[in-house]
């Protein structure tokens, strides 16, 4: 009896008992563990970013060999001319270039997609059959205040800008008012069209207009864009890819998207863009298209103006981005860890149990490893199946480990039900892109409501008191 009294009055034992039963110490320990567990969670987020970057590198490697993102600009008609100036009796000739855009332009295109696999990554590629057709009006040099005699009609050139020259798989021929000519590499106007093809065409001083047709067979990856250079431009695209993203300054006037493909039609007027139909010298430069892969062109001419982007285009996107979903899932880690720790804390409070901080740490690590499992499995199984597999494994591990902690089967079943509800709720949030914030806010509010309701009768001031403490201790207080 004396030994028991001595043991209970030992200050070290009393301090140890206080640490074990103190609510403040318990809450501080849980909060500290939550912060500690954010470190491996941040490392997993960084791993997701690294895997995503690796995917983009693989896409770039495959795209570079296949053809890359494609941007079509043109056609543009150029006609050189000469001006003369006399200074102190000496006449000097200067060579210039006039640029003309088509009166009408119609682009008819059919995109056939392909999926190429490199390692564990998929890359969306396409082969485009394009036909650029329309009409150029007779070049109006009077509006440019130029004399007919100064025009070099025989040197007129038609050029089409193509950002990914490696994607051209067939010889490009132009039908110019019934005359067929092969287009050669290079545009002769690197400021306006950094890359592309061109051909000399026949112009007459008193012509009435010129019709053209340019079939192009082009390989590309994911993205295809066009510059609406016509006074009236119509772009009609069709594809067997089921998940397009229409981008650029103009959205389709008509579009139809089904599970087997899409079709889209754009109609753009010259009034919808900033640059004119004709100009002299390099005073106009088209804005570089995103994803186009065009080389950056720096101009030294103060007269050159780069107009705002007026392109239109489509991107063949992969509807299921595993890394994006993994990133979104990892953002909810603090919520899952916090709710799970709260469950254990209430089991302690309401059931008079004692769970060691180290046990909290092991459970937290299991919750963190879930995201590593999810990332690795989603690369092979797809996100949904990976989420199901990882959550079942994590919940099973935690519940199996909790049998020895909780010692009451009913509490383990309650824990199982709560964890299933938490992981199920997070999965629903990941599917609700537009309403994720609303659903998440409502879910957190309901969880807080449940906590407040469950703890409404708890006497928080008496949680740290124990009947094992000596009566003298209470008298001293």
Image (spheres, rainbow, N blue to C red):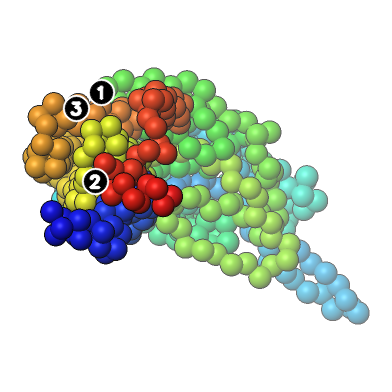
Q: In which quarter of the image is the N terminus?
A: bottom left
What distance separates the C-alpha of mark 2 from that of mark 1?
73 Å
Q: Dot 1: within a 10 Å radius of its alpha carbon, few (fewer than 14), some, or many (20 or more) residues?
A: few
Name above or below for residue 149 compared with residue 83: above
Query: Label for residue 260?
Result: 1
Side of 68 relative to 282 (left or right): left
Give the number of the disc on residue 230: none
Report how far apart the C-alphas of labels 3 and 2 lie in the structure. Answer: 30 Å
Sequence order check, earlier mark of 2 and 1: 1
Badge 3 marks a residue whose secondary structure is: helix
Residue drawn at point x = 62 percent, y = 31 percent: 269
Q: Residue 34's x, y, as percent?
A: 34, 51
Residue highlighted by disc 3: 414
Q: Please tell me whether mark 1 or mark 3 is closer to you in this view.
A: 3
Q: Is residue 262 visible?
A: yes
Taking the image as shown, residue 426 lies to the left or right of residue 253, namely left
Compare marks 3 and 2 and give the one earlier in the sequence. 3
- Residue 468 badge: 2
Dot 1 or dot 3, earlier in sequence: 1
The residue shown at (24%, 46%) is: 468
Image quadrant assignment for residue 418: top left
- Seen from the viewer's position, the closer of residues 457 and 66 is 457
* Viewer-closest of 69 and 461: 461
């Amino acid at each position: 009896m004396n030994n028991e009294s001595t043991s209970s009055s030992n200050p070290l034992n009393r301090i140890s008992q206080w640490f074990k039963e103190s609510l403040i110490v318990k809450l501080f320990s849980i909060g500290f563990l939550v912060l500690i567990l954010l470190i491996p969670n941040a490392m997993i987020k960084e791993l997701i970013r690294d895997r995503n970057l690796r995917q983009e590198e693989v896409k770039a490697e495959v795209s570079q060999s296949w053809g890359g993102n494609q941007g079509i600009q043109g056609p543009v008609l150029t006609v050189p001319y000469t001006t003369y100036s006399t200074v102190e009796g000496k006449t000097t000739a200067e060579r210039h270039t006039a640029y003309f855009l088509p009166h009408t332009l119609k682009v008819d295109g059919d995109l056939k997609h392909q999926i190429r696999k490199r390692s564990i990554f998929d890359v969306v590629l396409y082969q485009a059959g394009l036909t650029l057709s329309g009409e150029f009006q007779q070049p109006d040099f009077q509006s440019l205040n130029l004399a007919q005699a100064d025009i070099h009609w025989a040197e007129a050139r038609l050029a089409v800008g193509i950002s990914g020259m490696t994607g051209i798989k067939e010889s490009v021929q132009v039908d110019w008012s019934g005359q067929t000519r092969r287009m050669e590499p290079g545009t002769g106007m690197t400021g306006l069209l950094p890359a592309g093809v061109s051909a000399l065409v026949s112009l007459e001083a008193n012509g009435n207009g010129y019709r053209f047709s340019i079939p192009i067979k082009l390989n590309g990856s994911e993205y295809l864009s066009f510059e609406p250079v016509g006074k009236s431009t119509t772009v009609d695209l069709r594809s067997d890819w089921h998940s397009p993203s229409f981008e650029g300054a103009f959205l389709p006037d008509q579009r139809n998207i089904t599970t087997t493909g899409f079709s889209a039609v754009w109609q753009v007027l010259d009034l919808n863009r900033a640059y004119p139909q004709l100009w002299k010298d390099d005073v106009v430069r088209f804005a570089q298209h995103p994803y186009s892969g065009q080389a950056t062109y720096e101009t030294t001419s103060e007269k050159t103006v780069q107009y705002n982007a007026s392109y239109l285009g489509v991107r063949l996107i992969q509807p299921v981005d595993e890394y994006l979903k993994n990133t979104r899932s990892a953002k909810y880690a603090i919520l899952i860890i916090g709710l799970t720790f709260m469950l254990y804390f209430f089991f302690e409070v309401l059931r008079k149990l004692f769970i060691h901080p180290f046990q909290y740490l092991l459970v937290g690590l299991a919750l963190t490893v879930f995201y590593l499992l999810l990332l690795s499995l989603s690369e092979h199984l797809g996100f949904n199946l990976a989420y199901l597999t990882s959550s079942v494994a994590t919940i099973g591990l935690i519940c199996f480990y909790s049998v020895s902690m909780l010692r009451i089967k009913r509490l383990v079943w309650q824990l199982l039900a709560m964890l299933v509800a938490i992981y199920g709720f997070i999965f629903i949030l990941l599917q609700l892109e537009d309403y994720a914030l609303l659903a998440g806010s409502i879910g957190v509010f309901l969880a807080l409501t449940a906590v407040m309701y469950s703890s409404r009768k708890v006497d928080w001031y008496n949680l740290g008191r124990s009947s094992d403490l000596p009566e003298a201790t209470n008298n001293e207080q």
